Amino acid sequence: MLLKRITPALMVEDIKATIAFYEDLLGFELVLTVPSKDQIDWALMKCGEVEIMFHSKTGHAAKKDHDRAGTLTFHLEGEGVKELYDALRTKAKITRHLYPTFYGTNEFSMLDCNGCVLVFSEKIEKAEEF
């Protein structure tokens, strides 16, 4: 797999306060939230080419093993994610099998040797079924 970038995903206590901090002090813009602005479980923020994702500790994502197994989640974007998944699925601890996301990637998650989550993703034109 050819890696092109990494996006940290941080678990936070107060996601609305975190959004305000990154907007007001650091100039980040809010790109996307899930499920909505009223009850935010996840947010994507961007400043220039830098992206950071935030997960609420009490939200939907926090209840899934693949998002809370380690202290950090790294999103690694590149090419050849299906081939990497095929090569690793019997050798690594896969926490979420390859699937198409609502935000236009195919991705899978695994744990590293320290319990941190590695999410490998590849942008797609049209979602594939797995």
Image (cartoon, grey):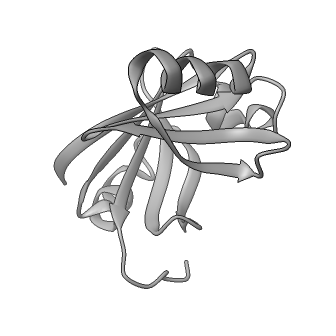
- Look at the picture and state if 69 lies above or below 43: above
Residue 53 point in image, percent of width and height: 51, 35
Instruction: Name the residue at 50% across, 45% down.
Output: 109
- Look at the picture and state if 50 lies above or below 13: below
Count the marks: 0
Q: Is residue 64 left or right of residue 76?
A: right
For this orientation, the residue located farthest to the front is 24
- Look at the picture and state if 90 lies above or below 52: below
- The front one of 91 and 105 is 105
Instruction: Name the residue at 56% across, 57% down.
Output: 97
Instruction: Name the residue at 42% across, 26% down.
Output: 112
Can residue 43 be seen at all in this image of the molecule?
Answer: yes
Q: Is residue 104 left or right of residue 125?
A: right
Residue 43 point in image, percent of width and height: 61, 40
Residue 95 point in image, percent of width and height: 59, 43
Q: Is residue 5 left or right of residue 26?
A: left
- The front one of 31 and 53 is 31
Instruction: Name the residue at 63% across, 37% down.
Output: 66
Residue 2 point in image, percent of width and height: 14, 53
Q: Dividing the image into 4 quarters, which one contains the C terminus?
A: bottom right
Q: To which quarter of the image does residue 122 belong?
A: bottom left
Q: To which quarter of the image does residue 102 belong?
A: bottom right
For this orientation, the residue located farthest to the left is 2
Can residue 116 be seen at all in this image of the molecule?
Answer: no
Q: Dividing the image into 4 quarters, which one contains the N terminus?
A: bottom left
